[in-house]
Amino acid sequence: MPDKRSSGLLRRVAAMLYDSLLVLALLMLATVPFIALRRGEAVLDSPAYQLSLILVIYVFFVGFWTTRGRTLGMQSWGLQLEDENGRVPGAARASLRFAAAILSFATLGLGFLWQLVDRDKISWHDRLSGTRLMHYPKQKKKAVKAES
C-alpha cells in the first residue's frame, strides 16, 4: 500500500487552480449555445444560463469525485478524495461536499484555511461531508541492476 497523508493547503490550492482553468473552459463552451440563441446578446440575466453554469461545475466535480475520486487537477498533484473507509465517495456524499465547499469558499476561504488549525488537518467541507483529501506521494523508483 502506498504511503499517504492528509493533503496540505498549498497542494490543495494548486489543484484548485488547475481545475479552475478546466472549469473555465467548460463554462465557455456552455455559454456558446446561449449566445447563439440570443444572437450575440448578453445572457447573464438568464436564469437558465446561470443554472446551466452551476450544473456544469457540479457535474465536473461530483462526476470526477464519484467515478475516480479525483479531478484532473487533483490527479496532477497526487491527491485522492476518500470517505472514512478509504473508498471513493458516493453521489450523496460528494454532493454534500460540493455544497459545503461553496460555503468554505463563500466565507472568504475560511473553510479551506481551517485545515491549518484543525486537529485532523481537514477543511470544513471535508468534515461536513465525511471525506478527506489525501496525498499519495509518488513512489521512488528503485534502481534496476543490469545483469551481466
Image (cartoon, rainbow, N blue to C red):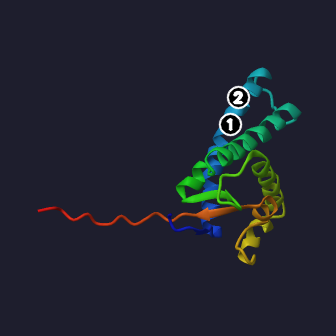
Residue 134: percent from left, percent from top: 62, 64
Which residue lies at the image location 11% right of the left edge and 62% below the top edge?
148
Compared with residue 101, is residue 24 higher up or lower down, i.e. above or below?
above
Label 1, residues with CA under 10 Å away: few <14, some 14-19, many ≥20:
few
- The outermost residue toward the left is 148
Identity, as a three-letter code, of the amino acid under mark 1: Met
Please state which of residues 119 and 84 is positioned toward the viewer in this rendering: 84
Dots 1 and 2: beta carbons under 8 Å? Answer: yes
SS class of the residue under badge 2?
helix
Residue 135: percent from left, percent from top: 58, 64
Residue 147: percent from left, percent from top: 15, 61
Residue 41 left/right relative to 60: right
Give the residue pinned by disc 2: 32
SS class of the residue under badge 1?
helix
Label 2, residues with CA under 10 Å away: few <14, some 14-19, many ≥20:
few
Which residue lies at the image location 66% right of the left edge and 58% below the top edge?
82
Q: Find residue 87 and name its label.
A: none
Give the residue pinned by disc 1: 28
Count the labels in the image.
2
Identity, as a three-letter code, of the amino acid under mark 2: Val
Residue 70: percent from left, percent from top: 62, 51
